[in-house]
Amino acid sequence: GAWSNTVLQGLLSNQELQTEQVEEFLLQEGPVLCQMRVKLLMKEKQMEKAALLAKTCSESSAFQGKGAFKQMYLVCLCASLEQDQLMEELSKEDCK
């Protein structure tokens, strides 16, 4: 199915994956499909999985204009009540 890719499953379960595998997967998926996946996970209240995928996309060299993924990641952190992690991410932004 649409969610059965082993790299995607690894990302959603926070497994250690090789960077090359992740970058190749993201290039194949493209930013639009990845955004749709994150938004669907958010809609289904699977905030931890959505946060993992959004964070991976926001840190990837595969995509240009990664601000939307960063914003979705921060929204997921807010919704999942990961306040310490949220504050850490926001403080990183202040340093840039």
Image: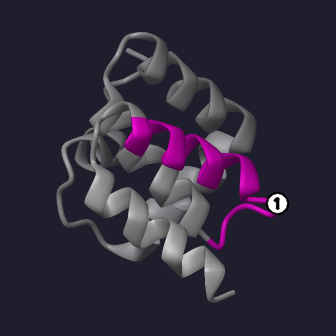
Magenta segment, prevailing SS (helix, strand or loop) = helix
Observer able to see residue 12: yes
Residue at numbered disc 1: 65
Please indicate whether residue 63 sits to the left or right of residue 84 in the image: right
**Which quadrant: the C terminus?**
bottom right
In the image, the segment drawn in magenta is: 61-78
Residue 75 in the magenta stretch? The answer is: yes
Residue 24's quadrant in the figure? bottom right
Residue at left 34%, top 30%?
Answer: 47
Q: Nearer the viewer, residue 70 or 27?
A: 70
- Badge 1: residue crowd in 10 Å (few <14, some 14–19, many ≥20): few
Q: Which amino acid lies under the numbered mark 1 shown in the image of this protein?
A: Gly
Q: Is residue 9 magenta?
A: no
Q: Quadrant of residue 93?
A: bottom right
Residue situated in front as seen by the camera: 39 or 25:
39
Q: Is residue 14 left or right of residue 29?
A: left
Residue 54 picture location, percent across and down: 51, 47
Q: Quadrant of the N terminus?
A: top left
Counting from the top left corner in percent of width and height, residue 17 is at: 26, 66
